[in-house]
Amino acid sequence: MTCKFNGCNEAPLSLSEFCWDHLPDKEKYSTKLLEFANTDKNLSGYNLRKVSLKKAHLERVDFRKANLSQADMAGSRLFDCSLEGADLVGTNLSDCDLTHCSFKGADFTKAHLFNARLWNSDLSNSNLSECDLSFADFWEAKLFNTKLWHAAIESAKSITSKNFASPSGFAKNLKIDENGFFSAEESYRELKRYFLNRGMYNDASWASFKEKTMERLILKKVRSPSYLPNMVMNLLCGYGERPDRIVLAAISTIFLFAFLYFSFNAIEASANAGYRLSWADNIYFSTITFTTVGYGDFIPKPYMLFRFLVALEAFSGVFLTGLFIFTLARKYSAR
């Protein structure tokens, strides 16, 4: 079905035989639509492309899967509306009250949300690519798995890493839409800058870690030789954002080398060559070697392999200690 206007191939608006461009009386149509919306409250699946509903009161209306692309709804009040899966491409929602709305899976590509209030709204799985979010307020809004490529977030309000938490409530599952590693990396970088500019260093740490994770996945995809060292840095220190991983790596290194010394009987007491070292003695020797203390009460036996193992552990200790100091300084001081 197409618009009744001769030669127009546009689909007609719901409750009309014409598209918006060829409506004989646009004001009359808008009035009729508002009356219907406030009476029936169900505009699910309606074609409302390009309609003008400025400063309208549309509280609790069901717009699920409606086509509102390029519609002008500036200044409207849409409190507690459902717009799940709605087409909002290019829609003007500037200055709108969108408190407690559900936008799950909605497409906001190139939409205008300038100064919009999105308190406690659910935008999970929505597409906010190239969307104008200047001065939009996202207090307690849900942004899990949203696509933020080239979205203007520099002056947006109330965004924290918690906005990106999974609805399942799993605290560590914080993410945007990561389908497309390049766009996700760029989006995380913009979020990092947003948080840093506001002194939100823990949130910036999360965004920085996710940015580097996307970089690693890109390196893997293009089979870059830089992938391996990138992966090692992730495992050791989480790209400088996870100091606890270095502590775990240090403890694991000490026990690994202690096991090797014990298995090969590689260490002897310097004052008593016949002394058989216990498991505890090997852990002690591994610890003082890792920390490069070296009291001299235990030494490696005079074989190249054993001396190499001791030298390797000493180097690992110096490296991990330096990395730990660098990570702490970067995470808590450099910013």
Image: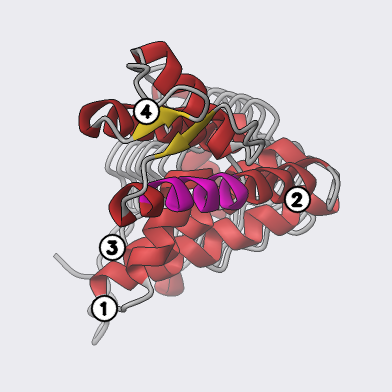
Please determine whether, in this image, residue 114 is positioned above or below residue 215.
above
Start and end of the magenta stretch?
Answer: 309-320
Picture layout, residue 44 above or below residue 214: above
SS class of the residue under badge 1?
loop
| 102 displayed left or right of 57 | left
Three-letter code, disc 3: Pro
Label 4 vs 1, first from the N-terminus: 1
The spot of residue 43 in percent (x, y) is: 35, 36
Q: Amino acid at mark 4?
A: Ala
Which circle's residue, 1 or 3, is located before the other in the chain? 3
Instruction: Specify the principal SS of the magenta part.
Output: helix
Can residue 310 be seen here?
yes
Residue 92: give its label: none
Q: Which residue is mark 3?
A: 12
Q: Residue 59's spot in the image, x, y percent?
A: 57, 25
The circle drawn on residue 222 is 1
Going from N to C along the chain, the mark reached first, 4 or 3, is: 3
State which mark lies toward you, 4 or 3: 4
Dot 3: element = loop
Marks 2 and 4: CB-CB under 8 Å? Answer: no
Quarter holding the N terminus is: bottom left
Please tell me whether residue 310 belongs to the stretch shown in magenta.
Answer: yes
Q: Which residue is mark 2?
A: 330
Q: Residue at x 65, y 35 (%)?
A: 118
Left/right placement of residue 251 relative to residue 291 reads left
Residue type for callout 2: Arg
Q: CA distance from mark 2 to mark 1?
A: 29 Å
Q: Do residues under tags 1 and 3 come within 8 Å of each other at their CB atoms?
A: no
Write down the residue under mark 4. 258
Q: Nearer the viewer, mark 2 or mark 1?
A: 2
